[in-house]
Amino acid sequence: MLQKKNLVISSLNLRAQDDLRQDLDETLQRLRALEGLKGILTDTGRQFNLQGLSPQPLPDPPVDSQSPSRESFEAKEIPATAYRPTTPSPGLTAKEVLDALEFDPSAAQRDCETLLRMRAGPTILSDNRLLYIIRSFRLRAWLEIDESAALLINGGGESRPDSEASYIAAKLVESLLIATQTTPCIVALAYFCGQHRHLRTDVYASPSEMAMSLLLQLVHAHQDSLTPGDLQTCLVGLDPRRIGSICDVLEKLVDMLGGETFLFVVLDSISFFAHPAPRQQETAELLRRLTAIQRKPTKAIVKLLFTSPSRAIFVEQMIDEYEIINVPQTPPSAGKWNDSVFSELFGELKDDADDSSDG
């Protein structure tokens, strides 16, 4: 028995060493990428015609006595690789900004595909729960109303990243991303927290990375229309470590959108970012800023969708009761789920968007 126990301990130690070696390799790869980026941003041979600030090292963010120290949060709970470089220098094009800030344009699509594969084989998804969500009049109103709106879906089930609420969110984002290819007035930003929930193993499992992802998705969606001057106006002073700084830039970009634009922002399984406490506080700051953007007068129509597999109490405090769908723990029997139910709902939305773009 003792020999067997020693073998198990030895095996665990080897596995821990392998994990540590992999983490170190990833850290070294990111450091090499940052060194290359530093060379791009400090290249004195580039000629810029724009007026503005030259790249300066950003000061450390002020310490807020009411919120946890950002440095202590990252050092203790987020991998060292979860850090982005500071603001690109003036004069960079949208593509160069996206490259410099390491934007992955296929990330949201990959997360969608992961969640949608749940229906490809045996599944634990509840047809009744799926149908309850998709047939909710509040979801239909959120989609079809011709004005900015926010909605929280409390899934009422177990706290799983592969919940019914996540499946509906993935279906919606997939359809929106397809629609953007033929309907330019639709812009879709998405982040799937349940797919990036592990602080110690996922470099994107932080609220600042979620905020940066939304920001860069918006830049990517409008890279053909954003001039270097627009980007300089928006990006000057950006600190990718601070939610407030990122949201300031995001708000400026939203203000630049035309009046015919439908901007959808989908944050799925937001309850996975409700712990530990420092992550919840930063997530709440991001959500407060997003709801403020949604509620202010803008040319674009801004639609916010937050989902939780169970319940996101900290989000409920930011929105009104009529903006919440509470799915029962045991939804009434409603038959079998069929993708055509969703297709019909989304088709009505796309028709509305087409009518709006036609004037």
Image (cartoon, rainbow, N blue to C red):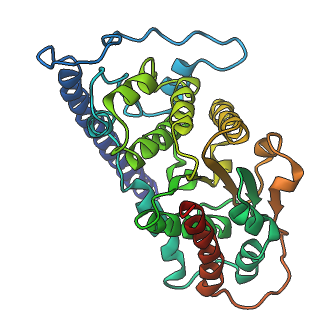
Q: Is residue 231 above or below residue 226?
A: above
Residue 35 picture quarter: top left
Residue 48 picture quarter: top left
Q: Is residue 256 above or below residue 181?
A: above
The outermost residue toward the bottom is 335
**Which of 120/286 is in front?**
286
**Which of 38/201 is in front?**
38
Residue 16 % position (x, y): 37, 44
State left or right for residue 319 relative to residue 25.
right
The outermost residue toward the right is 321
| Residue 87 visible somewhere in the drawing | yes
Residue 238 picture quarter: top left
- For the point 68% across and 49% down, which residue is it? 271
The outermost residue toward the left is 45
The total number of labels drawn is 0
Which quadrant holds the C terminus? bottom right
Q: Is residue 119 above or below residue 175?
A: below
State left or right for residue 231 relative to residue 341.
left
State left or right for residue 355 relative to residue 67.
left
- For the point 50% across and 57% down, which residue is it? 185
- For the point 29% across and 20% down, which residue is it? 89
Residue 291 % position (x, y): 70, 40
Residue 251 % position (x, y): 57, 33
**Which of 352/148 is in front?**
352
Residue 92 % position (x, y): 27, 28
| Residue 201 visible somewhere in the drawing | no
Q: Is residue 339 above or below residue 15?
A: below
